[in-house]
Image: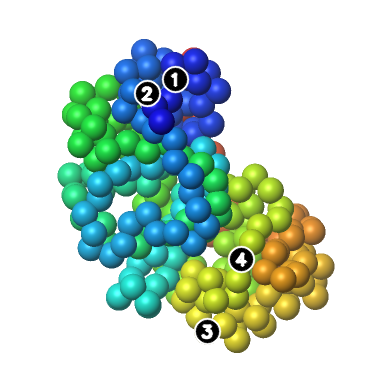
Amino acid sequence: MPILKTDVRSMKNNLLAAMPEHELHRMLSKLSEVELVFDTDIYTLNEKIRHVYFPNSGIISLLAAVDNSSTTEVGIVGREGMVGLPIFLGVSLSRVRAVVQGAGQALRMSAGDFQDECTRGEALSVILRRFANSMMVQISQSAVCFRFHLIEQRLARWLLMTGDRMEMNDFHVTQEFLSNMLGVRREAVNRAAKSLESSGFVENSRGVIHITDRPGLVASSCVCYGVIKEEEDRVLAAGKAAKV
């Protein structure tokens, strides 16, 4: 259903919240609320992008794929961003698989309406350029992380990034899912998870991971987490400053 204008001031998505109210009001009639259902595909590989998504809660993972069964996570998007950047960049096909990693809610807009808004050259375009750079940092840093860092460090980074976006320390995840995210065998994920658990940083019970010692988990993570978070915080600060 369309979003009402009275919802503007309580907008949870950071990108939309940074928009000037008169521009956001214009966009509201083109946005609709949708549920993000865990383990549901938003985009599949080489599929035409028909909608873009601005999460208010939950997480969407971006998976680079050789095919629909061989994937590695290259990015995570929560309420700090949006899914559908290729449309902003003039590309209509998705070269990644996008899957809901954490259940939540999003605001959805058709690709055509989104293109129309982007071509106006107003605040939305400026905000999306900042976010696009933030995603480039996340994706490039993930590539560095995959090449140079231990699985335990990569898992710690992933858990921290997921916790940040879910805004909670408990979330549902399976070893099979983590295996796809990190691009390693389930046995390697199991060893890494047990290592973090034995250090007292996390607890794992029936597919639910609980972060018990966040500072310890940060210390055990690689530098990539700090690099990615610093860039995301910079984009958020720039959006708040522009709104003021």
The secondary element bearing badge 3 is classed as loop
Q: Earlier in the sequence, mark 1 or mark 2?
A: 1
Mark 3 or 2: the one toward you: 2
Question: Label 3 vs label 4: CA separation?
Answer: 15 Å
Residue type at the position of mark 2: Leu
**Element carrying mark 4:** loop
- Specify which label sits upstream in the sequence, 2 or 4: 2
In the rendered image, which residue does mark 4 sit on? 173
CA gap, disc 4 and disc 1: 34 Å
Q: Which residue is mark 1?
A: 4
The image position of residue 42, as x and y in percent, is 37, 54
Mark carried by residue 212 = none
Tag 2's secondary structure? helix
Amino acid of disc 4: Val
Query: Residue at 25% across / 50% down in the picture?
Result: 49
Q: Earlier in the sequence, mark 3 or mark 1?
A: 1
- The reply to whether discs 1 and 2 touch (Cβ–Cβ < 8 Å) is yes
Q: Residue 71's x, y, as percent?
A: 39, 73
Left of 102 or right of it: where is 119? left
Residue under label 2, please give it: 28
Q: Position of residue 118 (x, y in %)?
A: 24, 31
Q: Regarding mark 1 in the picture, which secondary structure is present there? A: loop
| C-alpha distance separating marks 1 and 2 | 7 Å
Residue depicted at 39% across the width and 64% down the height? 63
User: If you read the primary sequence from the N terminus, does the residue marked by circle 4 or circle 1 appear first?
Assistant: 1
Q: Quadrant of the N terminus?
A: top left
Percent x, y for residue 234? 50, 37
Residue in front for this viewpoint, 212 or 177? 177
Residue 185, disc: 3
